[in-house]
Image (cartoon, rainbow, N blue to C red):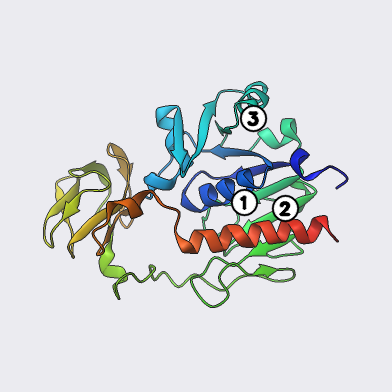
Amino acid sequence: MSKGLTELIVLIKGGGEVASGVAHRLFRAHFKVCLTEIPHPQAVSRGVAFSEAVYDGEKEVEGVAAELVQSAGEIPKIWGKNKLPIMVDPETTLKDTLHPDILVDAIMAKRNLGTRLTDAPLVIGLGPGFYAGRDVHLVVETNNSENLGRVIFDGETEQNTGVPISIGGLTSERVLHSPEDGLFVSKKEIGDLVTAGEVVASVGRQAVKAEIGGVVRALLKSGIQVEKGTKLAEIDPVADNETCYRIRARVRAISGGVLEAILVRLNA
């Protein structure tokens, strides 16, 4: 890559919590960042997810705003407004028009949904499902272990444990999942306080209750059809609703790994 740092275009697949944290850090580092999303994003940590712009037109996270665009031609205008463009593009066809210098797959699907080594001069995969040197150039560890944020130059990440981050010594008790297939309807909002046993939402005819008391830190958008087992919400036992709108330490570690991976390649 012969371009200067501020000329490099970074295309990020995904607009959820991790993708947004990566976009936020790279935007702060003066890269030209653009995100792609699916038509109906299902981010749960919506307080820190740029994917909300797909529904509302714009979303701000810690002082950085993303704005929805309908075409590639609008992207330079959004950069000119010092904002992040985000476009509904489930197939990531934008890469063929934008010609990014760097592509980051931050969908967090725990498997590769189609990202290839040839998608950009530097392709970075986040988490399980990618093999550095085969599917992508570099991989960043996303498992909440001692290796969190580590850049992997050859091989793959640790396997997903399925165990949520511990807060106040609580893990799986904090997370609510769908008991069945059906329409998700929330009874609360992000930032609301709940008590143990209180109804947070419903799926079909079944109520979804909080196992612990605390603040609703993350909550799926109401009115979405979900499948059994879908993550619906997170309850934070530390009743501070400001945490709902702050990028988590885990995500900052991952985004730091992405920035390191880019700089390693730039300075090679």
Can you tell which mark lies on residue 79? 3
Residue 257 appears anywhere in the view: yes
Viewport quadrant of the C terminus = bottom right
Q: Please, what is the three-letter code of the amino acid marked with disc 2?
A: Val
Residue plotted at (66% across, 63% down): 139
Residue plotted at (66% across, 42% down): 11
Q: Mark 3 vs mark 1: which is more N-terminal? A: 3
Q: Residues within 10 Å of mark 2 (few under 14, many from 20)?
A: many
| Residue 236 percent across, percent down from the top left | 28, 61
Q: Please, what is the three-letter code of the amino acid marked with disc 1?
A: Asp
| Residue 55 percent across, percent down from the top left | 40, 30
In this picture, residue 126 sits left or right of residue 6: left
Q: Residues within 10 Å of mark 1 (few under 14, many from 20)?
A: many
> Helix, strand, or loop for circle 3?
helix
Q: Are marks 1 and 2 in contact (CB under 8 Å)?
A: yes
From this view, report whether residue 161 is shown above or below residue 123: below
Residue plotted at (29% across, 72% down): 168
| Residue 228 percent across, percent down from the top left | 30, 54
> Total number of numbered labels?
3
In this picture, residue 54 sits left or right of residue 155: left
Q: Please, what is the three-letter code of the amino acid marked with disc 3?
A: Trp
Spatial CA distance of label 3 from label 2 is 22 Å
Q: Mark 3 vs mark 2: which is more N-terminal? A: 3
Can you tell which mark lies on residue 123? 2
Q: Mark 1 vs mark 2: which is more N-terminal? A: 1
Q: Quadrant of residue 196?
A: bottom left
Can you tell which mark lies on residue 17? none
Residue 91 appears anywhere in the view: no
Q: Check disc 1 and report the residue beneath it.
A: 105
